[in-house]
Image (cartoon, rainbow, N blue to C red):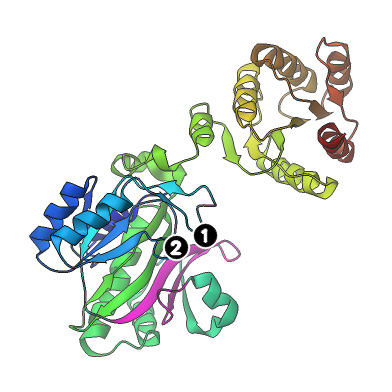
């Protein structure tokens, strides 16, 4: 689950991670009041679930309450477009107003799971304020990495090594070590899957603070954190994905034309690959799970065809846990309930696959029954392009 910058900083403060003073605001009048309370230069930052806000006009300096209010009038309600939002952008509904700082250096710190090693990796770089992917591609030697032992956690010597690598000295070094240790605790205790501070700034007074903060929380651990679950902002999420979550469907919207309904994440990924190889693009990732009941299939269909880009539906089910003939009956009933008007290609393999094919062929609905995986991909492309 993604959360906003101001929410990430609330979590960080709980674990004594240094962040600038700031408050979230929903109206220009609130922005003016906060700026007046600070009595100095403030930064106004649009709160959306996307990076690159500065380049898109979502981060502005204000030197007076009047200027802060005028900036907020333009920013609140705007459709902010960044390289992560796509051309449609995201509507700005709230802003974070923070104190201005005298910045001496901009650094980078981040923690993520390295799946190849099954360990968390703490990364730091002197190249702050730049996308870490670009640093990794152009100057990978400037990224310092410390792998965290799963049984021991981040050790003090690793924090010192990271701080040395960032070129911190004196009070900066002491503050930096404390910051990095606290950041890991916030990451670990919150069951985060990502914690990224970019930039991590050093002020002229020697303070080390998280000027920006991004955190993603592991969905599977949210039951342990009701206070974080309450931070979920559905306005920032794809409406169809929100709808799918109500029925425990694993759905992710994409930009293609082929609606995919598959049981099993691995098979779903393979189905998407084969659609691309056949010459089209998947409109979604949808894993209906091992059961694939009538209700599940019906809800899946309804969500699939709610996407106006879907021109055809490909059902690719392997009957292992559930028999193919039962899936076929569910598909027929679901299509009759929902009233799908686009071509439907069905490939069922596994237990009772032949019986399932017979049911589909004899049904009043015109299904395109595929004999194998490759045939299904070819037929779905033919159904769209003729």
Q: Which residues are magenta?
A: 104-130
Residue 247 position within the rendered picture, expressed as x and y whole percent measured from the top left: 52, 26
Q: Residue at (72%, 24%) from the top-left corner? A: 322
Q: Is residue 379 visible?
A: yes
SS label for mark 1: loop
Residue 37 position within the rendered picture, expressed as x and y whole percent measured from the top left: 8, 59
Residue identifier under label 1? 83
State the residue in front, 378 or 13: 378
Q: Residue at (35%, 40%) from the top-left corner? A: 229
State the residue in front, 86 or 211: 86
Q: In the rendered view, does 28 fall on the left or right side of 369?
A: left
Q: Residue at (52%, 59%) from the top-left corner? A: 83
Residue 145 position within the rendered picture, expressed as x and y whole percent measured from the top left: 48, 77
Q: Is residue 155 above or below residue 92?
A: below
Residue identifier under label 2? 52
Q: Is residue 208 above or below residue 366?
A: below
Q: Within the image, what quadrant is residue 160 found in?
A: bottom left
Q: Is residue 96 visible?
A: no
Q: Is residue 33 above or below residue 267?
A: below
Q: Which secondary structure type mostly characterizes the magenta part of the structure?
A: strand
State the residue in front, 88 or 24: 88
Q: Real-space Cα distance between discs 1 and 2? A: 6 Å
Label pair 1/2, CB-CB below 8 angstroms: yes
Q: Residue at (46%, 68%) from the top-left corner? A: 149
């Amino acid at each position: 689950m993604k959360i906003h910058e101001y929410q990430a900083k609330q979590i960080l403060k709980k674990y004594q991670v240094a962040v600038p003073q700031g408050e979230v605001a929903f109206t220009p009048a609130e922005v003016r009041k906060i700026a007046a309370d600070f009595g100095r230069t403030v930064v106004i930052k649009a709160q959306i679930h996307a990076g690159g806000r500065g380049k898109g006009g979502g981060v502005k300096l204000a030197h007076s309450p009047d200027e802060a209010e005028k900036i907020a009038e333009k920013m609140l309600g705007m459709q902010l477009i960044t390289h992560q939002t796509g051309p449609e952008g995201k509507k700005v509904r709230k802003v974070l107003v923070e104190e201005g700082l005298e910045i001496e250096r901009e650094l980078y710190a981040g923690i993520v799971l390295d799946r190849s090693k099954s360990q968390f990796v703490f990364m730091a770089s002197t190249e702050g304020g730049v996308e870490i992917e670009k640093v990794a591609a152009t100057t990978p030697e400037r990224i310092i990495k410390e792998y965290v032992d799963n049984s021991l956690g981040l050790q003090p010597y690793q924090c010192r090594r990271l701080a040395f690598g960032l070129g911190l000295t004196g009070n900066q070094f002491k503050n930096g070590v404390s910051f990095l240790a606290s950041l890991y605790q916030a990451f670990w205790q919150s069951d985060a899957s990502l914690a990224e501070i970019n930039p991590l700034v050093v002020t002229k007074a020697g303070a080390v603070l998280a000027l920006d903060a991004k955190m993603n929380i592991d969905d599977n651990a949210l039951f342990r954190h009701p206070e974080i679950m309450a931070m979920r902002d559905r306005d920032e999420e794809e409406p169809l994905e929100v709808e799918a979550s109500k029925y425990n469907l694993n759905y992710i919207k994409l930009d293609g034309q082929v609606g995919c309904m598959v049981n099993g994440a691995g098979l779903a990924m393979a189905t998407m690959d084969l659609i691309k190889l056949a010459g089209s693009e998947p409109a979604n990732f949808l894993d209906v799970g091992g059961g694939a009941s009538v209700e599940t299939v019906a809800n899946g269909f309804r969500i699939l065809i709610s996407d106006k880009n879907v021109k055809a539906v490909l059902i690719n089910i392997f009957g292992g846990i559930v028999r193919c003939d039962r899936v076929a009956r569910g598909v027929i009933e679901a299509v009759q309930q929902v009233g799908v008007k686009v071509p439907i290609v069905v490939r069922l393999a596994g237990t009772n696959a032949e019986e399932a094919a017979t049911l589909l062929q004899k049904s009043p609905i015109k299904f395109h029954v595929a004999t194998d995986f490759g045939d299904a991909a070819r037929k779905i492309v033919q159904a769209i392009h003729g």
